[in-house]
Image (spheres, grey):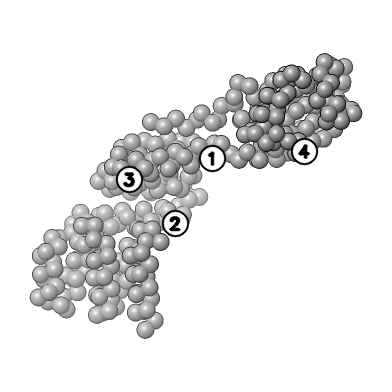
Amino acid sequence: MLELDGTAEAPADLIKDGTDATFAADVIEASQTVPVIVDFWAPWCGPCKTLGPAIEAAVTKAKGRVKLVKVDVDANQAYAGQLQVQSIPTVYAFFQGKPIDGFQGALPPSEIDAFVDKIAALAGDPEAEGLSAAIEAAEQMLEEGAATDAAETFAAILQEEPNNAPAYAGLVRSYLALDDVEQAEAILNGAPAEISTDPLLEAVHAQIRLAREAANAGPVAELQATVDAEPDNHQARFDLAIAFHANGQVEDAVNTLLELFRRDREWNDGAAKTQLFTIFDAHEAKDPIVLNGRRKLSSMIFA
């Protein structure tokens, strides 16, 4: 099972004392991947004693998205001179080896937090990226038939981010893949209100409905024979479409429903159109079968 909380822990070298000898490694090289804030200070500097702890607190809250290097200018004058540090405290932010921002003097905590957040944002959000990678891994598991592993991974993601719609939909699809429609529906019904109308959750709602219909679908061969013998038997044609979809023959299901709609669009309160929209919702919008089916239905509706 995937561990998702690694990015939440701050690195051991998040805050360190730097020197002229270590500046290249601690700041120039390190900032190639993670922004580094450099605090030039001195032991005798009163404002430094206020600014230093405030920056440390803000950097710690950023959880590894930015680092802090503290340089005592009395003991290390080379880089302070190169950067023209004329008064202290002076703060510089480095990213990809270059100074990109900075300020002089003590600032209120709110401004320090805003500065650190702005610099940290340059490297993106590792936690969000980690969740995105976890979702991709879970989707791969599901595609390869490892539905139980996928369900565990999606569930772990939701522990980190309860309102993650892709993970919620993935968890529902995992239980559908395990033929546990009841659990899939229970999970969907428990979705947070904030994401309940997300298209991904609407899609799995349609998939649940189709899964329930599939459980009661009749044999394709028998239904096809009935339709061939009784072309005006709309119920048999509708049932054939359900059987086709249950058998994985999505295009045949769509074409059968389109034919039913052509013959009698009002039959059973427009059941053919309703079923078509359920199928369209259950599959990816860019699926060629869905795109073609929607186009044909639209041409019939507006003919």
For the residues labelled 1 and 2, the Cα–Cα distance comes to 21 Å
| Quarter of the figure with residue 147 | top left
Return the disc, 4 or 1, that comes first in the chain's sequence. 4
Residue holding disc 3:
143
Q: Secondary structure at mark 2?
A: helix
Which label lies toward us, 3 or 2? 3
Which label lies toward us, 1 or 2? 1
The quarter of the image holding the N terminus is: top left
Q: Secondary structure at mark 4?
A: strand
Residue, far bottom = 303
For the residues labelled 3 and 1, the Cα–Cα distance comes to 23 Å
Q: Amino acid at mark 4?
A: Asp
Residue 122 at x, y percent in the picture: 66, 40
Instruction: Tell me the crowding category of disc 4: few under 14, some 14 to 19, or many 20 or more residues within 10 angstroms, Cα based.
Output: some
Q: Amino acid at mark 3?
A: Glu
Residue 199, which numbered label? Answer: 2
